[in-house]
Amino acid sequence: MLLLRSIAAALLAALLVALPARAALFDDEEARKRIEAANQRLTQVQKQLEDRMTALEAQLKSQGLVEIFSQVEQLKSDVAKLRGQIEVLNHELEQAQKRQRDLYVDLDSRLRRLEGGPGANASSAAPGAGAPAAPAGAPAAAAAAEVPAPAPGAGAVAPPGPSVAGARPGAPAPDAAGEQRAYDSALDQFKSGKHAAAIASFTSFVKTYPKSPLAPSAQYWIGNAQFAQKDYRAAIASQRQLIAAYPESQKVPDALLNIATSQFEMGDGAASRRTLETLIAKYPQSEAAIKARQRLAIR
């Protein structure tokens, strides 16, 4: 009996000792679970933050590239406009110089007729009597060349009215004026940014006046207007047509430069370089060759 009581007391004591230990074990497991759950939640929050940061960085990078691309396109457009304005100014300068030379030649021919004496007056006033009449469409300088030189010692001066009136043919003036008006109208369209209308007008001009001194310039402006429209293939074809039809024209170097620029805009840097080198080799003294050297130095 005493032994049984001793065993029961021992079991009770052991049970009392085991209960707190098991309770402590349960508390540690729950704490570990809570810590693990907190760690998982923290990991999830950190991953979400990293994903959001990555998305924001990608968005910022894409916006920056778009902005840079827009700026590059704007710069290209500005450069094309400046090139067009420079070409317009160069053309206007050439035309002003040409008009000045024509005015000088016309004035000189009139003075020569006025100083020609009676013989020259007779031939000028009545071309059918002593000299053949100037053909319709012939310039005034050609008509002046057909007037005989004054005889030595001829002192009388012909009256200005009949001489000038008889020497200037009336037929070519309207044609020349209409030709100039057609060209200037097409050029004004280009200046105003109406590139499609300018292409149509210059194309009509070339077909109507294929032998005009302004025809090479008109063909050049067709290609330049197509370049402004970013139709680079058409621009190259138009400038090559200029080179083939008018190989001796002063616009050929400018046409080669426009071809090289169009090739570069199309991404064909090798072809652009070859065209620039050809331009420099064939026309080393031209302004277009100076620009070509500058571009080759940059690339």
Image: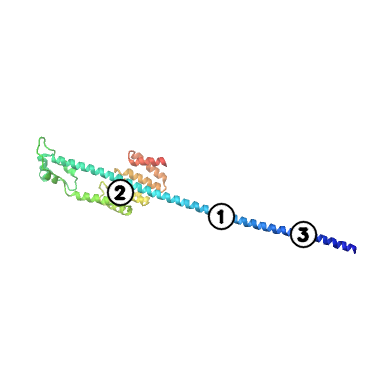
| Amino acid found under the numbered disc labelled 1 | Asp
Decide: marks 2, 3 in contact (CB < 8 A)? Answer: no
Decide: marks 3, 1 in contact (CB < 8 A)? Answer: no
Front position among marks 2 and 3 = 3
> Is residue 202 among what the camera can see?
no
Q: Quadrant of residue 116?
A: top left
Q: Please state if 67 lies on the left or on the right of 101 as rendered.
A: right
Image location of residue 128, percent across then percent down: 11, 45
| Crowd around label 3: few <14 · some 14–19 · many ≥20 (10 Å) | few
Quick one: label 2 or label 1, which is nearer the N terminus? 1
The residue indicated by pointer 2 is 219
Q: Secondary structure at mark 3?
A: helix
Rounded to the nearest angstrom, the CA distance separating label 2 from label 3 is: 104 Å
| Amino acid found under the numbered disc labelled 2 | Gln
**Which residue is drawn at the image coordinates 50% and 54% (left, top)?**
59
Image location of residue 207, percent across then percent down: 27, 51
Image location of residue 297, percent across then percent down: 40, 40
Q: From this viewpoint, which residue is outermost toward the top?
A: 153
Quick one: label 2 or label 3, which is nearer the N terminus? 3
Q: Please state if 264 lies on the left or on the right of 40 as rendered.
A: left
Q: Quadrant of residue 281?
A: top left
| Crowd around label 2: few <14 · some 14–19 · many ≥20 (10 Å) | many
| Crowd around label 1: few <14 · some 14–19 · many ≥20 (10 Å) | few
Quick one: label 3 or label 1, which is nearer the N terminus? 3
The residue indicated by pointer 1 is 51
Q: Secondary structure at mark 1?
A: helix
| Amino acid found under the numbered disc labelled 3 | Pro
**Which residue is drawn at the image coordinates 47% and 51% (left, top)?**
64
Rounded to the nearest angstrom, the CA distance separating label 2 from label 1 is: 58 Å
The residue indicated by pointer 3 is 20
Question: Of the numbered discs in the image, which one, if any, rests on residue 7?
Answer: none
Image location of residue 256, percent across then percent down: 35, 44
